Structures are given as structure tokens and as C-alpha cells.
């Protein structure tokens, strides 16, 4: 997704910033073969611009992405103003239980993730449970805050652990160690297949944060049925500023002995 957005960025004026990215995954690409990114200019206005990106492999469309950009010039008209804040109270100074530490290689993943304890209301209900995550891109990004690099990095990390949320709030193991397990003991996966069907990222700010510093992600799932689950996530800067909101639909095929 981040690579597709980077390709679309090359077709808009420099004063435009990414506002929304909408992705539909159709076929899983072969990671050993090259991908071709085809960008189509759908519209270009003074305030907004829309681009369509098709990711192809072997001449077949694998992923379809629509990106909407907006002119980053200061808004001078009247406007409503509000933003949700962080719900969780737990903070950490650095990531110490990185989910990718034991599998990271020369080709990535170039990020760190640590799952925090679930936050539940009383009585506990999967539809109101929050699965918090702390993340950061690593190694550090050389570009300053407000540059496209940090926007693309947020897209890059927005997709990880979204699909884990419905599993975690239902107590289904998915291969990683339990939250907070310092022994890092793997758990048996309770599903045969888990895949993302679509993924959308809405950006609310384009400056004032760094993706290579800690960001807090609050993930929840308001609905699940028929092998599918809807996942909502909010990405905040370490100071509590709302950076982006994400929506994902995921598909699961469970093993017969899965705990559900």
C-alpha cells in the first residue's frame, strides 16, 4: 500500500498531501516476482486530486487502490473542530517485546510492534474491547516531519496487527506469544487462513509527528460473523494527537478445534 501511495504521490503537485487511501486485495502476489504499479489520474482540482493505482503481476491485477490527495494550504474558512483522544492510560518508554524481533531480516519488516494488555469494559464484550498496540518504524527516517516519508510509513504500519484484534478479543491464539509473555513462547495458531479483504486509511494531520517514534494504536472490532470481521483502528502520536483512522475487513478460516 505504501509503495502504491508513493507512486501516486509522484503524479500530484508538491503542495498536495495524502488524505485517504482505499485498498482492495484481490489476489495474493508472489513475493519473488516484480510488481508493476500503474497510476491513473482520475481528477485534479485546486483542493483535491484523486488517483487510481493498480498493482499488477504477470499481467494480472492483484491489488486495486484509490488515493485522494488534498492541497495542504492553510484553511481560511469557518470549520468545525474536534478530535477523539487516547482511551488507554498505559504508556511505555520503548518497545521491549517486539513481535518482529525474532523474524526480522535484511528485507524487513522495518518496524517494531508491542501488544499491550486488552482494555475491557464491564461486563467484558468483544465489541467494546480495545486491543492496544505500540509501534514505530525502524530504522529512523531521515526526512523531517511533514514529509511524505512519514505518511507512507504510517500506511506501512497501519496494516499490521489489525487482523489480530478479533482473534485476541475472542481468545483465539494466532501463533505469537501471549501478550506480555517475556519468555516469548509461541502459541498454536487457531486458524487455517487469515487475510485482509480491504483496508482504508484516513489521515487527519500531515505534520507534527514522526513515524519512527512511538505511536499508539487502539484497535477494536465492532462486528464479526460468517468468517469475516470488521476492524477499526486509531493511530495516535506519543503526545496523544490523532494521526489517522483505519478500517479493515478481514476473512478467517478456523481449525475445527479452535477456541471460539
Image (tube, rainbow, N blue to C red):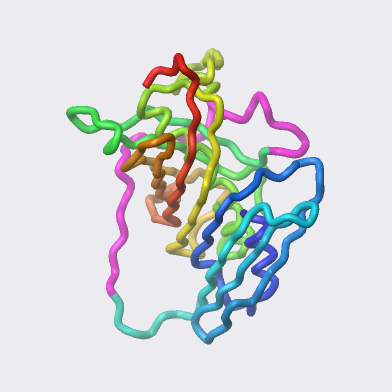
Q: What residue sits 49% from the left and 20% below the top?
A: 255
- Residue 149, given in percent of the width and then of the height, sits at 64, 59
Answer above or below: position of 1 versus 165: below
Answer above or below: position of 174 versus 113: above
- Residue 50, given in percent of the width and then of the height, sits at 56, 74
Q: Magenta-highlighted stretch: main secondary structure? A: loop
Q: Is residue 92 magenta?
A: yes
- Residue 94, given in percent of the width and then of the height, sits at 51, 34
- In this view, the residue in front, 259 or 208, is 259
Q: Which quarter of the image is occupied by the C terminus?
A: top left
Q: Quadrant of residue 117?
A: top left
Q: Which quarter of the image is occupied by the N terminus?
A: bottom right
Residues drawn in magenta? 80-108
Q: Is residue 230 magenta?
A: no
Taking the image as shown, residue 75 lies to the left or right of residue 56, namely left
- In this view, the residue in front, 165 or 105, is 165
Q: What residue sits 36% from the left and 40% below the top?
A: 220
- Residue 49, given in percent of the width and then of the height, sits at 55, 77
- In this view, the residue in front, 240 or 191, is 191
Answer above or below: position of 75 versus 3: below
Q: What residue sits 78% from the left and 57% below the top?
A: 59
Taking the image as shown, residue 60 lies to the left or right of residue 170, namely right
Q: What residue sits 39% from the left and 42% below the top?
A: 218
Amino acid at each position: 500500500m505504501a509503495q502504491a501511495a508513493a507512486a501516486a504521490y509522484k503524479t500530484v503537485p508538491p503542495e498536495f498531501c495524502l488524505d485517504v487511501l482505499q485498498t482492495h486485495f484481490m489476489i495474493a502476489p508472489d513475493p519473488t516476482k516484480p510488481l508493476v504499479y500503474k497510476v491513473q489520474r482520475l481528477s485534479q482540482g485546486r483542493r483535491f486530486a484523486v488517483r487510481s493505482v493498480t498493482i499488477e503481476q504477470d499481467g494480472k491485477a492483484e491489488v486495486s487502490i484509490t488515493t485522494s490527495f488534498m492541497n495542504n494550504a492553510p484553511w481560511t474558512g469557518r470549520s468545525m473542530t474536534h478530535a477523539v483522544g487516547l482511551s488507554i492510560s498505559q504508556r511505555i518508554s520503548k518497545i521491549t517485546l517486539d513481535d518482529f524481533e525474532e523474524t526480522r531480516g535484511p528485507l524487513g519488516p522495518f518496524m517494531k510492534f508491542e501488544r499491550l494488555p486488552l482494555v475491557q469494559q464491564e461486563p467484558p464484550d468483544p465489541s467494546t474491547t480495545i486491543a492496544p498496540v505500540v509501534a514505530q518504524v525502524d530504522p529512523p527516517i531521515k526526512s523531517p516531519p511533514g514529509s511524505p516519508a512519514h505518511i507512507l510509513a504510517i500506511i506501512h504500519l497501519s496494516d499490521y496487527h489489525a487482523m489480530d484484534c478479533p482473534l485476541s478479543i475472542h481468545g483465539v491464539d494466532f501463533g505469537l506469544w501471549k501478550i506480555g509473555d517475556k519468555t516469548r513462547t509461541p502459541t498454536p495458531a487457531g486458524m487455517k487462513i487469515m487475510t485482509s479483504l480491504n483496508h482504508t486509511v484516513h489521515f487527519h494531520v500531515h505534520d507534527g509527528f514522526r513515524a519512527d517514534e512511538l505511536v499508539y494504536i487502539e484497535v477494536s472490532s465492532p462486528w464479526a460473523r460468517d468468517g469475516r470481521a470488521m476492524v477499526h483502528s486509531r493511530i495516535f502520536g506519543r503526545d496523544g494527537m490523532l494521526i489517522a483512522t483505519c478500517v479493515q475487513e478481514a476473512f478467517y478460516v478456523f481449525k475445527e478445534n479452535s477456541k471460539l
